[in-house]
Amino acid sequence: MTHVSQDTPALIDCRTAARALYDYLDGRLPHVSHAEVQQHLATCADCADHFTFARRLLNVIPAAFPIEPEAQALRTRIVAALRSEGFSVDSSA
Amino acid sequence: MLDSPRDSAFDQRVLDALPHVVRFARALAHDEALADDLVQETYLRAYRSWETFRPGHDARRWLFTICRNVFLRHREREARVVDTSGEVAELESLGAMMDIANSGQRGEGELLDRIEVAPAIRAALAAVPEVYRTAAILVDVEGESYEAAAEVLGVPVGTVRSRLFRARRLLQASLLTYAVDAGIVRAPVPPQEESRS
């Protein structure tokens, strides 16, 4: 990876861009401006690829942990346990 | 039997959050049976301490906090891992981050297209130490803000940011290792060998 582009010097180098990766993707940049990172990504294909990969990864993480349709057996078990503690609502259904 | 107002409120505010608590516990424990036990214990503790729940607060986050505490009791050894989530750890992570960035030359861009992503991510996240994993679950799985995650974890927002940075970096590294082991992308080449070739 080119740490500073030879052709078009960027305002920040790859290390600084890597430090800003998640703040950039999460829209929180305390140290490096969004525009500076964008400029670096425009001149560094390796960092741009890595940012794209990181963004895609963050986007697919939630799908790896789907919300289960109501876990009825577990709910019934929990309500039964709560009843032993005095819970009075018929909430097992 | 008449429903008590206390129990009706618990039913509406807390039991309705069950699917989210189940997902949180399963992501945390990576073991369905253990996760279900954690969820049951979470609800028992929540019921016993319902009077401490502050009206207007987010019941889901309250349950996440309890669930994590229950989990940590099951994993006390892991909970004693030194929290190096400050700036030093963040800087230490940068070197590995740069290695991962280099992997673009080895097929990283195609990695997510070439592996069965969901099980790989679940396994990779399970390998991340709990102190970092929980931050990733709260923000990246549950979609909580940094501020909400800080509330659940009882730490400053900056600590959430650092833990999240490390969790995501470890997750990426773990996925890359998985892909290398599976022969999907090429193994990293040490820089000195690369320059000789």
Image (spheres, coloured by chain):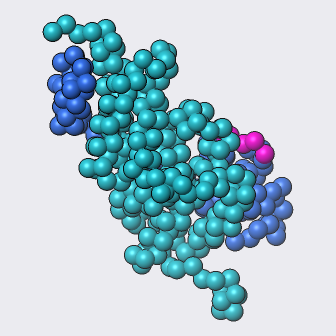
At horizontal 35% and vertical 47% (from top left) the residue drawn is B26
Tell me the magenta residue range. Answer: A27-31
Viewer-side residue, A10 vs A27:
A27
Q: Quadrant of residue A77?
A: top left
Q: Quadrant of residue B84?
A: bottom right
Q: For this view, does B56 lie left or right of residue A37? A: left
At horizontal 66% and vertical 86% (from top left) the residue drawn is B194
Whether A9 is drawn above or below B179: the answer is above
Q: For this view, does B172 lie left or right of residue B74? A: right
Q: Residue A31: horizontal and vertical position, in percent?
A: 78, 45
Q: Quadrant of the N terminus of chain B?
A: top left
At horizontal 76% and vertical 68% (from top left) the residue drawn is A3
Whether A79 is drawn above or below B183: the answer is above
Q: Residue B160: horizontal and vertical position, in percent?
A: 61, 43
Q: Residue B162: horizontal and vertical position, in percent?
A: 65, 49
Q: Residue B12: horizontal and vertical position, in percent?
A: 32, 18
Q: For this view, does A60 lie left or right of residue B197? A: left
The cyan one among the chains is B
Is A30 a magenta residue? yes
Q: Quadrant of residue A82?
A: top left
Whether B1 is drawn above or below B10: the answer is above
Q: Quadrant of the C terminus of chain B?
A: bottom right
Camera sees residue B6: yes
Viewer-side residue, A38 vs B188:
B188
Q: Main secondary structure of the magenta part?
A: loop
At horizontal 69% and vertical 71% (from top left) the residue drawn is A1
Viewer-side residue, A86 vs A45:
A86
The blue one among the chains is A
Camera sees residue A66: no
Is B99 a magenta residue? no
Viewer-side residue, B132 vs A84:
A84
